[in-house]
Image (cartoon, coloured by chain):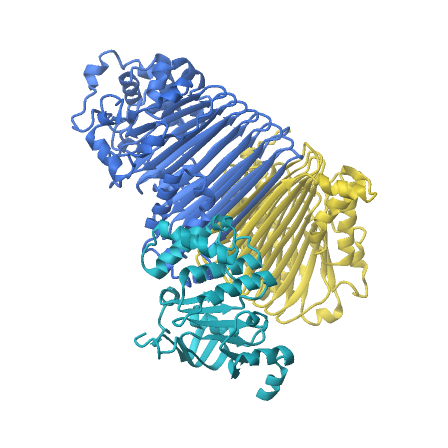
Chain colours: A cyan, B blue, C yellow
Amino acid sequence: MSDETNTPVLEVSDLHVSVGGKEILKGLNLTVGAGETHAIMGRNGSGKSTLSAAIMGNPRYEITSGTIVYGGQDIAELAVHERARAGVFLSFQYPVALPGVSVVNFLRQAVRAVRGDDVPIKAFRPLVKENLKILDIPQTFMTRYVNDGFSGGEKKRLEMLQMLMLQPTLAILDETDSGLDIDALKVVSTAINGLRSEKRAQLVITHYQRILQYVTPDHVHVLLDGQIVKSGGPDLAHELEKHGYEWLEKDAA
Amino acid sequence: MSDTTVDRPKGAAGTAGLGDDYDTKYGFHDDESAYDFKSKKGVDHEVVEMISRYKKEPDWMREVRHNALDVFLSKPMPTWGSTELLNSIDFENIHYYVRASERQAQDWDDVPESVKNTFEKLGIPEAERKFLAGVTAQYESEVVYHSLREDLEKLGVIFTDMDTGLREYEDVVREHFTSVIPAEDNKFAALNTAVWSGGSFVYVPKGVEVAIPLQAYFRINTENMGQFERTLIIADEGSKVHYIEGCTAPTYSSDSLHSAVVELIARPGSTIRYTTIQNWSKNVYNLVTKRAIAEAGSRVEWIDGNLGSKLTMKYPAVYLVGEGAHAEILSVAFSSSDQHQDAGSKVIHAAPRTTSVITSKSISKDGGRGTYRGLVKVHEGAEGSKVNVKCDALLLDDRSRSDTYPTMEVDDEAVSIEHEATVSKVGEEQLYYLMSRGLDQDAATTLIVNGFIEPFTKELPMEYAVELNRLIQLEMEGAIG
Amino acid sequence: MSTDHMNVDAGPETSLRDVVTTRGGNDPAWLATARQDALSAYEASSLPDRVQHLWRYTDPQRFLPGERTPTTPDSHFGDLPADCQDATYEHVAGYALARDGRVLRSALDPLIADKKVVLTDLCTAAREHEDLVRPRLFSLLDAGGDKFEQLSAATFAGGTFFHVPRNVTIDRPFVVAHRVGGDGLIASRSLLVAGEGSEATIVFDLTSVGDDDAPLRHEGLEIHVEPGARLHVAFVQACGKRVTHAPVIRCRVERDAALETVSVALGGALVKSLQTTELVGKGSDVRVLGIVFANGRQHIDHHTLQDHVIGRNTSNLDYRTVVADRARSSYTGNLRIGLDGVGADAHQSNHNMLLSKKARADTIPELEILTNDVTCSHAAACGPIDEEMITFCQSRGISPRDARTLIVTGFLEPIVERVPGQQLRERVRSAVADRLDRVV
């Protein structure tokens, strides 16, 4: 990131991605600049989660052509953990349970890995406490096992806690709003908004317009059958809410 | 099988020739400078006689030893477990008794420097002593350091090495020695009974709760030297005690044998927890017999971690003989290349409303083999008993192996037995999730493995939990990918 | 009476050899030789070691012929089971009637006979279908294995040969009704072959002539499920309470093939059953189902093995046991994934219900896993009928006795309903009900 003001945080060009031999993304283009929040909307199966998996580097997803440039660097060859250390964060749609691994231990290891040095326990504790408060998470959370027996809402809050602890340059929020009641949604939105800054960027992937009432995007894109078929401002989200996706499908056809 | 000619006198008749000139004839002082005394290699009545006389034991103990030796010599090798490895043990090429220092040190300053150095390397922190009840460190066969906090002494708790126990509490030892595990039980129990040395003797009086764990460390440090410690713990009515035994040993070039016997007696309403972490060097045969008698309303917990050794065969047992007694057996086995951990558990329900919970976790990597072998038997009349067995195995690569051999025998209708086992590998999704948080593959795998054994780790005192996680981390480093 | 079990072959040895020679006299030369070889192997092998856990609960000596001589099969079957009276083949595709180890008669729906399906006695088949029988017969025998398997291979009076040719699909079951009597040694061998891409169902309905008949039955079965074939086999054993029964069933399932076996064990004084299933190809699916319902002093010992030699396939085992009175059940199940078993998905479950204080159940569900990319589990449980379930039924006006019957029936039903052939299934249900009537 030599020139932070001009280099986009993320630049996806003509991206084709297959999973299990089936092509899901079919030439996707997307540029996210520093300080921007983008929303990617689309139905189930349109390729939203595939996009987030490809950016994070999930080995099950194969990039058949195109590039993903992050901070001016093609990250195709970077392993998942290297992308994380470079500042990419993915809030999982379905967070994975890690039985026996306590939240506190997990967070410490993640923070240590991403920051590259150990955070003294003295500094770590207040940081966690502060973030717990933002997310309205009880202290007892810390000794539970990661996502093990968590409710849907608890899982999403833990994802947000990790995001706040890791302070990513690019945060991808994959359907973070799904399964949340309105109170939880507000809390999660506060966390997302709190992270907005001139240097960071966010990609909010969602099926519904609901979360966008709390997290106002700079740009909205509609994903249909592996391609972005329409882009616009925040109004596009309202339009989708009113008319659904059908009119776009007709257009595309 | 051996190039040594072994004289095999039978029983008392066989020992008759070992007369009063024994001391002068065979001598007790070996020239190997660091060791005050070392028996010749191999085991026969001569060696047994020598050990017993050197220790100035009462006649009955000497008899017990000789009789046990006959049992050992006559019993065939087990035909199960790792028969190939078992049959490769060269009993004639082992020293059965080595004494490392002349006398028992009363405080840490008296412990020989060389012994201290070994402990230093193994990272037993000095600070530990501050909160430990007492440290009984067994350097090779003999206890060299022993201290016991005064308040425990005031409560009447006896925590001493077995040799001292035999000298000072002969009646108690005589009554209970081999009462839980007779020499006839199995070949290795017989061998231990014949040549035992060291180990702990613990007696906790009625109603006394020992708040802090009693600890002992065992080391094997002489090539080809067997270690045959013998531990007897008696928890009297309503008492409570936690005993911890940790083993780590440096690596040697030829094989060693460790064959301990641990007998626990839990009187009505008492609780005994016995925690072991063994990390013998990978040339050690670790063949241990551990058994508890649990009387009415008592609770016996075996917390058993197996990391080291070439072959471990160990099945901590609880005989639930009193109504409402409870057994808890929680074990972890970590098998790496050229290791076979054949571990498990045995619970006998012989009284009504007895309960047991068995949890086994096994991890195999680099071609290691982990075997769970268990027996649960519910006798007729043990109505209302409940058994829960859970065995999980994690295989870290495609060359490693996991076996599960649980046996359940149920002789009464009104009981409930549940058994579950799974075998799996580290989940791809878990790895991906952890790596997306910046952990590399080794760190992610280590974390998952540590999570897998967390039900075990959380039962350990903090310093052991840390040590265990560190050992796993060392094992995992560079091993993946 | 002096049955010296330790040296049991001393007396009847000559008669066994004579019988093998006589029975082999009607066989093609290759089979007569195979019988002699099997007898030699039988005589040379020692009894299974009781220390070995598969025989921990059952004394192998009780399966030696001792003074018993091989029974000459009766040539009368007696009353036909309902399934075998279906002259229009509405519910069955064909049937065979067997007595004392030999198939007396078989009949097929003419439309099915046209498809070259074979259902006949094994000895007949050895003569008439050498091309089908010879390459497969005894090919699944464990060479170093079971002594008693060699005994049935040497002395078998006959047995079932069933062959479904390539790509032939049959929608109705075949029924083999087998009745045994007397108190001699009854040995039989069966060979079932589902050719590539075929689909068929066959049920074995095993009974004894009278309640006092006390034969010793050694039965060997080999089942080949060739690539892409689907075979469903049921064994319903409802012999009298004096029969000693020792089936050894060897199955081999090739790529993309499916095998489901359902075993119902109700009869016999002493039963020792061994069933092994080798999965030797990808994409195959194996289901091993079984129920044991024992009362009185019955002793039923089952052993199963699912051996994933090759991976990327699935196997599921579900054995349910009910023991009453002083009966005893022992179950040992082994689930093995070999070095090339990557991707195997294998599960095993054994549940035991004890209905009386003197009843006994042993269960040993084993796993031997030699590679890591697998999904394997086993579960076992033993216990009485759940008191809460009885209380719940009572709260709905059902008497405790009826509740017990209901609960046990419900426990067994998921397996019973997998028994093909409506008539046979109903007979199993009523046998279960009769027995429940006596023990609950």
Q: Nearer the viewer, residue B311 or A225?
A: A225
| Quadrant including the C terminus of chain B | bottom left
Residue C172 at what x, y percent from top left? 73, 64
Q: Is residue A176 visible?
A: yes
Q: Nearer the viewer, residue B438 or C306?
A: B438
- Residue A224 in which image quadrant: bottom right
Q: Nearer the viewer, residue B183 or C246?
A: B183
- The residue drawn where x is 44% and y is 46% is B453
Residue B237 at what x, y percent from top left? 52, 21
Q: Is residue B158 above or below residue B328?
A: above
- Residue B182 in which image quadrant: top left
- The residue drawn where x is 52% and y is 42% is B406
Q: Is residue C214 visible?
A: no
- The residue drawn where x is 64% and y is 35% is B415
Q: Is residue A233 above or below residue C75?
A: below
- Residue A201 in which image quadrant: bottom left
Position of C82 with respect to A32 (left or right) is right
- Farthest residue to the top: give it: B20
Q: Is residue B66 above or below residue A97?
A: above
Position of B59 with respect to C29 (left or right) is left
Residue B352 at what x, y percent from top left? 62, 28
Residue C23 at what x, y percent from top left? 62, 51
| Quadrant including the N terminus of chain B | top left
- Farthest residue to the right: give it: C397
Q: Nearer the viewer, residue C158 or B185?
A: B185
Q: Exactly how many numbered labels are in the figure?
A: 0
